[in-house]
Image (cartoon, coloured by chain):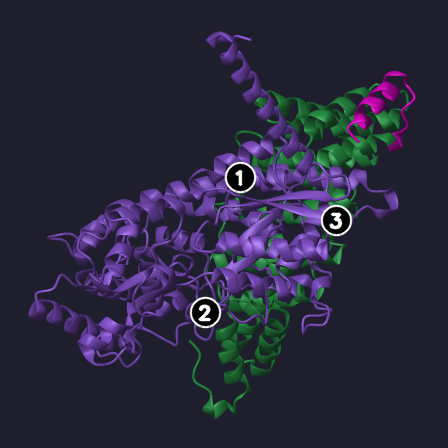
Chain colours: A purple, B green
Amino acid sequence: MKFSVKTAGWALMGAAYLMAAFTVARRTAESVRTDRVTIRFSQWQLEGTVRQAFDAIIARYEQLNPKVHVVHLPVPDTVYLPWIQTQMVGGTGPDIAEYVWIWPDIARRFQPLDEDIAQPNPYNRGTPLEGVPWRDTNVDGMSNDDSYIKSLSHYYGITVTSHVSRIVYNRELLRQITGSDQPPRTYREFVALCAKIQAYARVTNRQLVPLGSSQDTYPFMTYAIMGTMGTRLTQRLDYRHRLQIYQNQLSAQYLQGDWSFESPEMTAGLRLLADLGAVSTPGFVQRRRHTALTDFVAERTAMVVMPSWEASSLPVICSFAIGAFSFPYPREDDPVYGHLVQGPFGEGPRTSVMGLYVNRQTRHRAEAIDFLQFMTSVEGSRIFTEVSNWQPATVGVKPSGFAAQFSQETEGYAWGASYIGITIDAEQFLRTRFSTLWGAGGGVAAFQAEAKAGLGLRIRDDLRREGHAAVRNVQREDGIAVAGYFAAAPAQRPDRLPLVTLSNEIKVYQFNRVLAAPAPSQP
Amino acid sequence: MRMLPTVLLGLLAAGSLAGGELTAGWQALAGYRADEALKIFAAGARAPDPAVAREARLGQAVALLAKQPVTAGQVDEARRVCTALADGGPDDPALAARFLLGRIAQHHQERPDPAEAARQFRRLIAAAEASTWAQSALSRLALLQLYALDLARPPAERLAATEKLLAQAHVPAVAGELHVALAEAIFFYRLPGAQALPHLLAAERLGGTDRVGRADVLVQIAELSRLAGNRAQAAKYYRQFLQENPRDSANYTARRRLADMEAPPAAAPGGR
């Protein structure tokens, strides 16, 4: 029998087709099982071993619940938002999705969990959290922005972790330079340490800078420093007597002339930042986070500003022992700044993040809730921290050994005002002007002049936009409230409509009044 | 479940829809499915029972305010439907329509008309003060009076005028909400904080705030009591706040202040 080349080609193509068809058919057959429910869960945290942590939680959950299969969809953060929005709009969204409270359409795409979180988490049976409402098993009582959506007055997101930033340091290098691997305890000790590192670099002719930083990480220090330096100012600005200040309130008060970057506390904060810039990697405002990380790993910096979610990768890539400490903010006994501050400084209560939301259209609500309950139970949370090295968000669960260095400081004043991370455009504006503080020929006065010239305009735009968003919220909830009234049986109709909360509607009017008033002279 | 609207539309076409079936339209609206709701209500508006038809027309108006993208034409049409309903009888749809006319002028039309919104709310309150609709309108009318009307008058006068609305609040939560609105206005206009204290105490007693709003009220009472030198009352509310909000960001400060309030007066540091 004789085969032509053409026949052999057709035969090869046919074999390839059959093999592909078999593979596809086999995979389909594998994924479709009628004896169990499949739920899908998407998230974008691809750092370190976080994916493995979720996989470990899923494996244990499926062992306990063989009739539920959880598909984990890790999606890179660079494409996550357009991806999830497309999925949700197209009706193919996962049953559980990581989402952020500030992203659009939460009310349309996800469902409130108010009744679920008021019930105990069944997976906490036999633990100290047995019988405790699910909400109160979370370290912040689900009062964080992702869980309790203030504009909607409902609980939506279940949060699983928390984060802080720290200064991570090279223990061995520190010992080599100072004779001790203990981190500085006061601001003056920090200043002295930086001077020693600089002197060591000069004497040894080594390319070494005290502090590694980048455009991605400097805000963590900047916001906290301005916030702590502004504690006394913030107390004066708290005209609502709430012992905390919302960022949009701070922005409105800027327009009302209650504070400026020339206020004594802000001037002091800017001076401190200028000093910090002088011991940081040159050009850090333009550099990305991976360059700061590379410098630290290559021992070109002795310390590096590091958020806890990235730090979890360090034990894997550093060839030396590392430690971590909170920036030692100046306290009342500091000879220069002491008269302006009031400590101790806290980082607020532990505020959890990484909100997981339940799809409004899911056909497997019960299974989705059940999986979230396991994930945030004592057992699930323990698996999470041990494998990921991230902070747990469940009360009483101890962070893993490494994560413990990044535990939030809760004992101290926490007013919630950063003065930089105010409203959206205003924050971006201030960040672009930091080059005038740290750049050649710049300084505190140059930054203050820039802020004075342009900040008010940005805040006005922000408040106008926030006001419009609040009105859209009111509009949407009006219809829902009226519909809810008529959908209820006559005997069960409410004696007042569940409109958008009054505090949200007040915002519309107060912003309008602030925007309508003539600009006062800044203090 | 997706078949339900189709079945209902069929029933509507056959003229056999009873009022209860409009519930599906309201449920669609509550589920952010305004298009679906509009179809159900449009069919219901042709129902032979006048009560069903009126409720359906109200549903149409609400759906028009929700159907994306909301156009000026839709808002105008919703206003027209609501005006006809509000002027057409004393039933629930009429009161709801009057309420919506106020809300349309307040927030839905392109250029808000606070005077018209207040006029509609006042008419509603005068006509059926105890109704859900009038009670819901009270706090919204208060906002108009506090921040958008008679701006030439000093804030203290506007506050005094708004306090009179309290007499018309029959639902405790509505009265509580009004007290919060008044306290917030006192703070916003930087009037003496002590004036807000009675309002906050009343709001705490009457309710009407959600969990977050209640936390605000408890701290504010504690702080204003401390500043007024009422140590026992301040301590009581710091304690209450801490008990109800074990994880609030103000906890550390509240605990410190509580300790000051519980210490013998001579040992306590001065307040700010």
Residue in view at x 80 percent, y 38 percent = A487
Name the element at disc 3. loop
Tell me the chain of label 2.
A
Residue in view at x 13 percent, y 68 percent = A198
**Residue B16 is a magenta residue:** yes
Total count of labels: 3
Residue in view at x 22 percent, y 54 percent = A448
**Residue A48 is a magenta residue:** no
Instruction: Give the residue pinned by disc 3.
Output: A67
Q: Quadrant of residue A234?
A: bottom left
Going from N to C along the chain, the mark reached first, 3 or 2, is 3
Question: A258 or A448, which lies in front?
Answer: A448
Residue B101 coordinates in the image, percent (x, y): 67, 33
- Indicate whether A172 appears above or below A311: below
Going from N to C along the chain, the mark reached first, 1 or 3, is 3
Image depth: mark 1 or mark 3 in front: 3
Tell me the chain of label 3.
A
Number of residues whose C-alpha sits closer than 10 Å to that of mark 3, classed few (under 14), some (14–19) or many (20 or more): some
Residue A140 coordinates in the image, percent (x, y): 56, 64
Residue A160 at least partly seen: yes
Residue A407, labelled with which disc? 2
Residue A470 coordinates in the image, percent (x, y): 54, 42
Instruction: Give the residue pinned by disc 1.
Output: A104
- Mark 3 residue type: Lys
Going from N to C along the chain, the mark reached first, 2 or 1, is 1
- Mark 2 residue type: Ser
Q: The magenta stretch spans which residues?
A: B1-20
